[in-house]
Amino acid sequence: MTTILEFDVPYLARVKLPRKRDQEDVEYREVVPIAVRTIDDAPIAISMRGRTLPPHDCDWRVVDGRLYRPMFDGDDLPIRASEFHLAKEKAENRQARGSWIDYPLKGRTGRLITFLNAGIPPGATVFQSNREHAIAGAVREMMDAVLVIGGVVHMRAPAPVWCLNPRSNILSNAISSVELAMPDRDSPSFGYFRGDQSEAAVAFAESLLVSKDLPAHTFWPNTDVRLGEGRVIIHDENALDDPVAGSIHRAMVDIEYAIAPSELGKTPFELLVAFVELKRACQEVDSLSPTAEAVGRAGACFEAYRTAYAQFGDQDWPRGASSQEFAIVASERIARAQDLNLIADLASDPLATLSA
């Protein structure tokens, strides 16, 4: 069974607008009806309760081995399929706030769809457009990433995690707290731990406070680590990503976040090559069942990237330098496990200390 939902799909066109002399590239959007798979119910794999940031409570359901959570509107309320159009209208009327972060389609610069032009105006001359390709891609993506479960629109989403102060923009208190986060909604952060491993996350953060291996400017001295509110219950272990793959992918998120896309053009060539190779290697690591070869290649690329960053990176930029150091923690543990032939142990207990 399916439900028809209307999505605003972005596309790019090179046009000459009326009364303009020159061609220009403009991003437009078009309303496209998409048939979304609909099921009556699905088992709950993960529950999150009591988080201070909305939504306070959320359930992740498992369908075909993948996790889906409710899609929330601009007021952080679950969206019923029958009210999807109303949620879009509300976001349109409040677009200055940019509040509907769950909308699954974004413009090419990451802007919300509501900021884009509604359509090519009459009288414009169209020289080139990727409209058909963009619409076809959006249809495929939405049919795979969005479900209606029990009348509520759900989206494919990673499990909640404990991470190190996910919303801090001030480097010096980057580990002043450990907070419960939804990775697809909250800002990327240093270090991720399973939602049922809050104590391990705090212990890890406290160990970094006294570590000599990370930049001294990262921490306030003698600062206690605060544990944020909320709890997570995991009902189905099989629905979680492979912990080794998760470490690799999340380390890549930290590194990507530290290299702003606008700064890539200023990145030294050697570092840029290492970054591209690392990203490609991480993408080849399957989330559910990574091969030893893929893990080994990712580990080697992390090491190559760290070498390139140490030689060519901007060590005077605290956010960048510290993000690299934190991200590399995961890859070092993976490499250590490989050296000791302990990948299986790491997979069963990803927080274990690996020592000879």
Image (cartoon, rainbow, N blue to C red):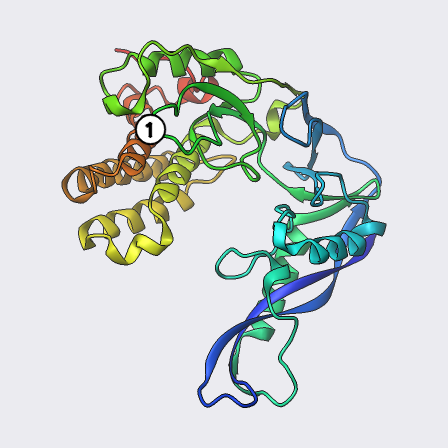
Q: Which residue is mark 1?
A: 326
In the rendered structure, the answer to whether residue 301 lies left or right of residue 308 reads right
Left or right of residue 103: residue 110:
left
> Which residue occupies the foreground of this view, 248 or 91?
91
**Residue at left offset 39%, top offset 37%:** 254
Which quadrant of the view contains residue 291?
top left
Foreground of the two, 181 or 66 = 181
Mark 1 packing: few (<14 Cα in 10 Å), some, or many (20+)? some
- Closer to us: 160 or 89: 89
**Residue 129, percent across and down?**
53, 78
From this view, report whether residue 112 is shown above or below residue 252: below
Q: Residue 325, position in %: x, y?
A: 28, 30
Q: Is residue 315 left or right of residue 200?
A: left
Any part of residue 104 in sight: no
At a point 75% along the width and 53% down the height, the residue shown is 90
Residue 160 seen in the figure = yes
**Camera-nearest residue between 15 and 63:** 15
The x and y percentages for residue 344 are 41, 21
Residue 244 spot, x, y in % from top left = 42, 28
Label 1 sits on a secondary structure element that is helix
Callout count: 1
Label 1 is placed on what type of residue?
Phe
- Quarter assignment of residue 327: top left
Image height check: is 280 above or below 50? below
Quadrant where the C terminus is found in the figure: top left
